Amino acid sequence: MCASVNQELQMLDSMAKEFAESELVPGREEFDDFPFSPLFDGALKKANEVGFFSLMLPEDMGGANRSMKALCTVLYETCRADASLGGVIFTNALAQEVMINAGASDMIPSPEEAGGNPRKALLAFAPFDNPVETENRARAKAVDGEHFLDGDVEYVMLGGLAERALVAATMEGQEGISFFLTDVGLPEVRVSEPVISLGLHACPAVDIRFRGARATLIGEAGEGGLYLSQAADRLSVACAAMSSGIMLGSFLTALDYARGRTQGGRLILEWSKMRMSLADIAIKMKCADLIVDTAGTSVDEAESGWQQASRAAALHVCPIACDVANEGIQLLGGNGYMHEYGQEKRFRDAQTVQSLLGMLPLRKLAYLNMVLEAGKY
Amino acid sequence: MSATAVKTAKDFLKQDPKPGVTLCSLIAGKKLPNAVIRETKQAIAAARKFNEEVVEPRALELDLKKMEDPDYLPWDLVEEANRRGFFTYFEPKIFGGKGVNLPAMSYFCEELASKCVGIANVVAVHYLGVATLVATWNVRLMNELMRDAAEGERLGEPRIMSMAITEPAVGTDVCEMKLLNKSDAAFRIDRVDGGYLVNGMKHFISNGHFSKWQIVFGYEDLERPAESVVILAIKSGTKGFSLGRQERKMGQKACPASELLFDDCFVPDDYVCYSPDQASRLRRPIIESNQQLVDYLSTASRPGVASFATGVARGAYEVALEFARDTEVAGKPLIDHEWAQMLLADMYTNVVMARLTYQEGNYANGLYGMFKLLQAKPIFYATKYTPKPVLDLFMSPILNMPLSTWMFRTLNFDLWKKEHQCIVDGYTSIAKIGATDLGLKNCQLALQLMGQAGLRHDGKAEKHLRDSKLLQIYEGPNEINKLIVFKSMISNLVPNTCMFDE
């Protein structure tokens, strides 16, 4: 993916690509049937084994202490094959990032603690929340130094999978939101059936209802919005990488089809309109790669304005991926609309990835606030 | 005319685009019978009642059911639509139908599609079969099969039609005879004593599993398919015909996309809707007549797809509006934010623009296409106010006479002016392209506005998005429709333009 990959990233890219080809591609359509077919436990287990769930954790926590570009590389390759696993990796990384920002990295499950069990290694999280702008319905109460959660949290990704969830709640008498870590298996926690949703089917989401569930406050009370915002600053570029990977998958499938299918007695690839469509996709894809690479470097190097680079990358690339995935279906005609070709899945996944980290228009407005606050213009 | 000559108004009107092209709605408006408005309102009301009582309670549940069990067939929906008379609602009264005017069907479809495009398709795709049959202008079979639908309604047994044209290796090519002749068409229909023998597979056939009659396209000569088109009416249960699997579609799940399998399936001459032998008796070369037939069919169906797209654009808008009204952002309702108001206004505009395209397509059809005859005021009122038993008694025997087919074919094939064919072709393709793009756009806007709420199945918006995408594909992908716009509206302005052969 990255235009200026170093050797380490190249190796990671190869490994992620190989992983995707062997673990994701063969079962993609079946995985996508979740919750009407089993979850891809085998792929999750292997992803955990190769360290995809602890990529950016510090080494003293058993993590690989990799860069943002490393995460982007893994997301790009997995999403090219099946964005659901990308959704799992992203959600977990976002939750870890929030906890690190809150100074609670010691509470993140380490690979050693997880013992090879992805359910223990992962953290459930609601990556669509935009608590700075929207009201959160869960409430927290402090009793004798302990915290208890009440209320509902919607669309918690990995909620039916991970043993623990990081959830946002408001505290009585406290401005803003706070984050809490809780055990999803507690009797006071009711987890819904998997939420049926547009895309990322094998990255399961649930609604959670809390009824006085014990939870641990993460970081300072009322500072959750800040922790999440900081995490979104870094992880936005990862969203863009996911979209970029989906674009590549869409392009490759369309190209294969155009090379093998005829229309009017000629290969589709030989018709100039079809070539133009493929060219449009290829150009958008290349530009997206460049954007992700530049923004990823900016984040890793903590360059001036890296937060804006990361957020702008997602805001620009994700909608483009939706257009590309749409065109990817169109290039296959009726076949593109069918389950077995993978294009319709990419179309759904691209739309879903676009909504990660919150509503697109609100994120755009928040971006302008960042620009204005930076005082550069 | 020399450069200095004074041009008259007539001269200016001879310049392109000519008024016949640009003033479709203006010319059509005054020609429309007044009762069309009343009938259209009745059709809208009937659709809204069906939505309230059947579609809304079932749409999401049915969509989920199909995800869980892709082989599930919602027969109850077909039976309910049959019970309400929807499968004969827009069939002409002389053929045993209720005779509601054909443009009203677009408004009817818009209503249904605003709640569920898949269910709208279950109801409306029967009329694609009807349109195919009508496009052959085989009046005897039109009479028999439409009356069979009416009989099915009376008996409570749906007897609907599907159109079967797409093959695994031939999709877009069927729209244009020049492409068809170069295609990998493999659906062969062999002439045998007393009829035809059918072998091959059709796929992506909407409602295939529900239909009693498949109106099937095939070719006597696979080397020259465009010159050897055969169209047959094949009844379910015919020996050698069986149903294959249902396709696993992203959306519009209520409506099965079926595989039809034919293995030495014999179809007697009585059910030959159209054949090279019949085509050879028309005035134009066979390949031109075959293009006319396909054009009749697609110009009738494209406004229907555009009306689905208008419906889905409206459905997405309505869901987004509800969300904006009920959601607070930064301490005030989302709908009070100016950016959200603008976005909703864009969506509303898209709905209206989409609707205008199918209206214009219908006007063109009423002036120059398939709807022309039925919308002529004398015919419209004569069929509307003549009691049905009288029509059944006197018209049906006449319609069964070969003379009727000859007359309809002369009027509709031989006397169909090329320029009129182009106008209808162009406007209906524009409707199909324009409305379906706007339909998808509105669904995407709804998802952007709603964030994660839009992704949830129970939030409805995501289903609209999945459903909308197919509209850009079926009835000819938008790409071929763009070429049709070029062919019918532009290429005649640039003589010797080469098409379909770059």
Image (cartoon, coloured by chain):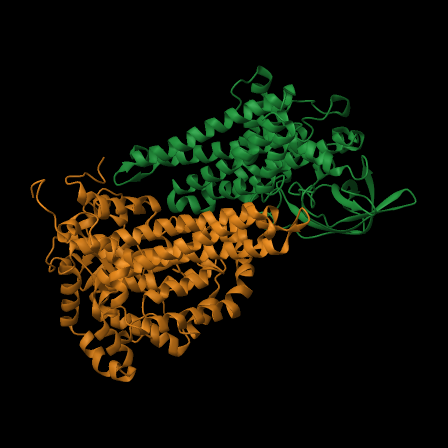
Chain colours: A green, B orange
* Residue B24 image-quadrant placement: bottom left
Residue A171 in view, yes or no: yes
Residue B11 rendering spot, x and y as whole percentages: 13, 50
- Depth check: give the residue in front, A222 or A240: A222
Which is nearer the eye, A81 or A353?
A353
At x 13%, y 60%, the residue is B414
Residue B193, x across and y down, in percent: 17, 62
Determine the residue positioned at 47% across, 49% down.
B346
Instruction: Please state which of residues A232 and B501 is positioned toward the viewer in this rendering.
Output: A232
Judge left or right: residue B110 versus residue B217: right
- Is residue B97 left or right of B466 when viewed as pictured? left
**Location of the N terminus of chain B (image quadrant):** top left
Q: Can you name the residue that lies furthest to the top here?
A: A7
Task: Kindly tell me whether residue B466 is visible in this rendering.
Answer: no
Q: Quick check: B334 above or below A370?
A: below
Q: Residue at x 22, y 57 (%)?
A: B293
Whether B123 is drawn above or below B354: the answer is below
Q: Residue furthest right?
A: A144
- Numbered circles on residues, count: 0
Quadrant in which the C terminus of chain B is drawn: top left
Q: Relative to residue A71, is residue B306 drawn left or right?
A: left
Q: Quadrant of residue B37?
A: bottom left
| Residue B149, image x, y percentages | 34, 72
x%, y% of residue B364? Answer: 26, 59
- Quadrant for residue B212, please give it: bottom left
